[in-house]
Image (cartoon, rainbow, N blue to C red):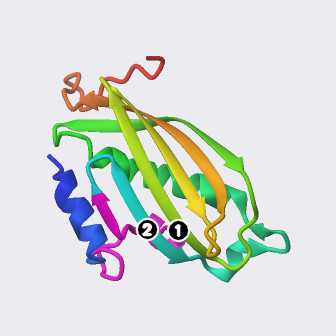
Amino acid sequence: MPDYKKLLDSIAKKDSVKDKETPQIVQRFFLPGIDSWCPGEVTTEWIVDEMLLGPTGLFGGYIAMVSDTMAAHATYSMMNDNEWMATKSIKVDFKRPIRDGKIIAYAKATRVGDSISIEVQYSRSDGEIAYIAIVEQLVRSTKNSGVDRHQWNLSG
């Protein structure tokens, strides 16, 4: 069983960011860690790699990917260790471009039963909100079907 709180503490301490155990996906896609967390909330600040900044600003697909990661971290903060989650939907609204690469992100999650809704706000270095993402997560128990697969009903 995973210990989600220890995982979040490890990410916040940056233990997993620069060591050999950092997941390949985090390294290859320049995913940020977190600076702090508490139940239902995650914050981070980072400077994105220049290759993600085009002539009009930050590549929007990157924000969708980071939103899924931030939502997962916020969701972990509200899950029991015998639960798993899956992303049901992600919606990203563009407000202003990010051109200098510095981002401050704040994720706030609300859980109702087995559904968690997360709002992630991305601010520029001048404090203006650049993007707002809404991510819907579904949480299920780790009870398996006898064939080592989790039973998911993603329609609910």
The three-letter amino acid code for the residue at tag 1 is Ile
Count neighbours of disc 1 (C-alpha within 10 A) and say few if under 14, some if 14 to 19, many if 20 or more. Answer: some
Q: Judge whether residue 21 is colored magenta.
A: yes
Residue 142 lies left or right of residue 156; in this view the side is left
Residue 117 among magenta residues: no
Picture quadrant where residue 156 is located: top left
Say which label, 2 or 1, has the lower sequence index: 2
What residue is shown at x 22% (from left), y 65% (from top)?
A: 9
Question: Hey, which residue is sitting farthest front in the picture?
Answer: 127
Residue located 21% across and 52% down the image: 4
Which x, y percent locates residue 124?
63, 69
Q: Name the residue at 71% across, 58% down.
A: 60
| Drawn side of residue 120 relative to residue 11, left or right | right
- Up the image or down, 56 lies above or below 109; here it is below
- Find residue 117 and report its horizontal and vertical position in percent: 44, 35
Which of the labelled discs sits on residue 104, or is there none?
1
Evaluate if marks 2 and 1 touch, with contact meaning CB atoms under 8 Å apart.
yes
Image coordinates of residue 80 in percent, x first then y, are: 18, 39
Q: Which element carries disc 1, helix, strand or loop?
A: strand
Q: CA distance from mark 2 to mark 1?
A: 6 Å
Q: Which mark is residue 44?
A: 2
**Element carrying mark 2:** strand
- From the viewer's perspective, is residue 83 above or below residue 35? above
- In the image, is 35 to the left or to the right of 119? left
Residue range highlighted in magenta: 16-37
Three-letter amino acid code at disc 2?
Thr
Q: What is the x, y in percent for residue 116? A: 39, 33
